[in-house]
Image (spheres, rainbow, N blue to C red):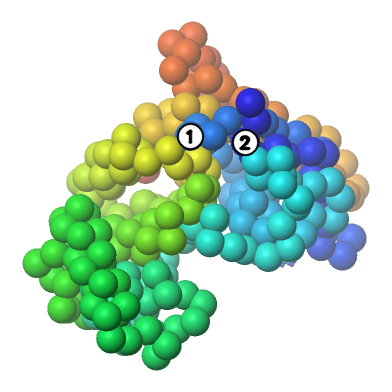
Amino acid sequence: MSFVTVTDVWQRYGTRSIIERVNLEVAEGEFVSIVGASGCGKSTFLRLLLADETPTRGEIRIDGGKPAREPGRERGVVFQKYSVFPHMTVRDNIVAAECFPTGLGRFFGVKRRAARARADETLERIGLAHVAGNYPATLSGGMQQRLAIAQALTARPRILLLDEPFGALDPGTRLAMHDFLTELRSQTAMTVFMVTHDLSEGFKLGDRVLVFDKPRWDPHAPEAFGATVTYDFDARDDGVPYQHILDRYPTLAAQ
Ligand SMILES: Nc1ncnc2c1ncn2[C@@H]1O[C@H](COP(=O)(O)OP(=O)(O)O)[C@@H](O)[C@H]1O
Ligand SMILES: [Mg+2]
């Protein structure tokens, strides 16, 4: 059964078409990787999934519900740049995520102590317990990104949206993050959408790999048409023409 249902979604900014005719059915718990040329609308598509923007046309339904008008706790998001609060300790970053949007100030006494205990459990799980009292600036890039993911997970979202989450990390840290994400997945039934500029990462982590591209192109009006899903691969299928995709999209090779 379809959990995330995208029906004929288009997105335009003024006269510019960014995305057109996207139709998609994603089952609960599926991990969908999204690849495509830079600027083709991948982040825009994630913003639509987040309900941070409403599509120009079409609709996105989660679990058969009404299309959302704004982001809610059921959708968590992590961007490439660390989106943690620099003026809070690692632990308070998790506590703050839990009491969003009311704010830390409204969260005191027994409730706050309970939230701190839960935050410490989360930090234990992601291997950051030893730096709970530190500020984010003192952490490595990989640790900050783990904190950002833990923050997004604190609200227990049913959908996790990752926009090139490991793009700024060195190759070793990226591999460690792959293991971390794989482990998290085995512990939750989360549905994940991950944009990546690395095709091999998309195939390694995803159950499915979607390629976004512009099937229609008018050299006299380059902004007339948007991108859509041109390929939808089963990442577990050994017969996927991996080399063919790389030949066509050389920038998607591992960097
Ligand atoms: N809010 C916006 N208003 C106008 N143009 C936008 C907006 N957001 C993105 N764009 C444009 O849409 C195109 C796709 O952007 P984006 O989704 O960020 O691509 P990608 O993530 O695939 O690199 C880009 O040309 C970008 O400049
Ligand atoms: Mg982007």
Where does label 1 land, which residue? 29
Residues under labels 2 and 1: Cα distance? 9 Å
Disc 1 is placed on an element classified as: loop
Residue at 45%, 31% (x, y): give it: 206
Total count of labels: 2
- The residue carrying pointer 1 sits among few (fewer than 14), some (14 to 19) or many (20 or more) residues within 10 Å by Cα, namely some
Q: Which mark is residue 98?
A: none
Quarter that holds the C terminus = top left
Report helix, strand or loop for mark 2.
strand
- The foreground one among 172 and 76 is 76
Q: Position of residue 58 (x, y in %)?
A: 84, 46
Q: Is residue 198 left or right of residue 127?
A: right
Q: Which residue is mark 2?
A: 3
Q: Residue furthest top?
A: 239
Name above or below for residue 242 compared with residue 142.
Answer: above
Q: Disc 1 marks which amino acid?
A: Gly
Q: Residue at x 16, y 58 (%)?
A: 124
Q: Is mark 2 within 8 Å of ligand 1?
A: no
Whether label 2 touches label 1, CB < 8 Å: yes
Q: Position of residue 189 (x, y in %)?
A: 43, 38
Q: Residue 96: percent from the left, percent from the top?
A: 37, 76
| Disc 2: CA contacts within 10 A as few (<14), some (14-19) or many (>=20) | some
Indicate whether 76 appears above or below 243. below
